[in-house]
Image (cartoon, rainbow, N blue to C red):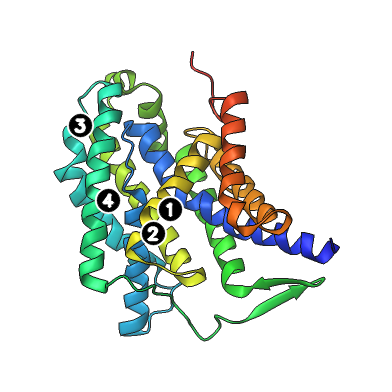
């Protein structure tokens, strides 16, 4: 197989893998702090993509410049969803909380999917700015400008989140609550406010990821399950609560799927990705960068 084809496959995997990481980090943050498993995360990502699409279509807002607007829209949606649905689960024991949040998230995902079908039909929508077809060629490897920009933005968001959690008082409060909410309460931390902030921050990151999906690929009402599954795979592979692990897990999944499409068949790319996921889970159940219990 030509070296250029191998390099192209690796580059494509890295570009999509960073997007997987960004899509998963919001879910990882919410679950790591609140123990709420929001399986409607993909539908929230879908809404972020549609927000950017209509901003571009109706008002001519550049998709990358519109990322803050998309994130703001998802912050509002996240506030409403948390207050109406998930805030009622916070006081449940952890196992009951996970089971109940699965059911709530599944129902919410179906509802959002059907609302999107009613509002925007089942057609695929994509954002095509004037530079959509521009390609950078490096040593024979073709790198679309849009996807390279998405890669850089994904890295910036993940780095900014890491610094926020490590360096700010609010970030430290989030980490403390994730480790032991009772001890955090004794230290004067308002854990309910931390839960709300974590959930809203997770939905905002879903909005950013949705914009990058819309500009690099396309959005449709039924895309949520696909992206939720990708996020869950990356979350488990990288380790819950590890931002670096989430990024590396996303890159591994992206490169694995891209290589499988070249070396085996495009029909088996998702199967190979799941096989790697199961292998990591068997060898290291806590994920590549997750800490062992106790």
Nearest the viewer among 273 and 202 is 273
Question: Closer to the N terminus: mark 1 or mark 4?
Answer: 4
Q: Residue at x 26, y 28 (%)?
A: 97
Answer whether residue 287 is visible to the viewer in this image: yes
Task: Report the Cα–Cα distance between label 2 and label 4.
Answer: 11 Å
Checking the image for residue 223, the label placed there is 2
Task: Report the Cα–Cα distance between label 3 and label 1.
Answer: 26 Å
Q: Which residue is mark 4?
A: 109
Task: Report the Cα–Cα distance between label 1 and label 2.
Answer: 6 Å
Q: Secondary structure at mark 1?
A: helix
Q: Quadrant of the N terminus?
A: bottom right
Q: Which residue is mark 1?
A: 226
Question: Closer to the N terminus: mark 3 or mark 1?
Answer: 3
Q: Secondary structure at mark 2?
A: helix
Direction from residue 226 to residue 256 in the image, left or right = right
Q: Residues within 10 Å of mark 3 (few under 14, many from 20)?
A: some
Q: Residues within 10 Å of mark 1 (few under 14, many from 20)?
A: few
Nearest the viewer among 100 and 176 is 100
Q: Residue at x 21, y 44 (%)?
A: 82
Residue 121 occupies quadrant:
bottom left
Q: Secondary structure at mark 3?
A: helix
Q: Is residue 136 above or below residue 105?
A: below
């Amino acid at each position: 197989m030509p070296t250029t084809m191998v390099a192209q496959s690796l580059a494509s995997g890295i570009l999509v893998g960073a997007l997987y990481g960004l899509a998963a980090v919001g879910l990882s943050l919410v679950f790591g702090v609140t123990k709420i498993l929001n399986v409607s995360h993909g539908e929230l990502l879908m809404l972020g993509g549609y927000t950017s699409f209509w901003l571009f279509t109706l008002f001519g807002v550049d998709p990358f410049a519109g990322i803050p607007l998309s994130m703001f829209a998802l912050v509002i949606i996240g506030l409403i969803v948390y207050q109406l649905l998930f805030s009622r689960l916070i006081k449940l024991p952890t196992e009951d909380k996970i089971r109940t949040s699965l059911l709530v998230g599944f129902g919410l995902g179906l509802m959002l999917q059907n609302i999107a079908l009613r509002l925007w039909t089942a057609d695929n929508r994509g954002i095509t700015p004037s530079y959509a077809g521009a390609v950078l060629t490096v040593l024979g490897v073709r790198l679309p400008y849009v996807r390279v920009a998405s890669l850089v933005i994904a890295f910036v968001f993940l780095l900014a989140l890491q610094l926020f959690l490590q360096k700010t008082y609010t970030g430290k409060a989030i980490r403390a609550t994730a480790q032991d909410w009772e001890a955090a309460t004794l230290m004067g931390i308002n854990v309910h406010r931390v839960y709300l902030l974590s959930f809203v921050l997770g939905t905002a990151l879903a909005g950013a990821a949705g914009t990058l999906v819309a500009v690099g690929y396309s959005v449709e009402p039924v895309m949520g399950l696909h992206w939720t599954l990708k996020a869950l795979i990356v979350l488990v592979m990288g380790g819950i609560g590890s931002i670096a692990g989430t990024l590396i897990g996303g890159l591994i999944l992206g490169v694995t799927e891209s290589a499988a499409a070249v070396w085996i068949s495009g029909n088996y790319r998702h199967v190979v990705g799941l096989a790697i996921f199961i292998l990591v889970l068997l060898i290291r159940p806590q994920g590549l960068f997750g800490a062992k219990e106790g």
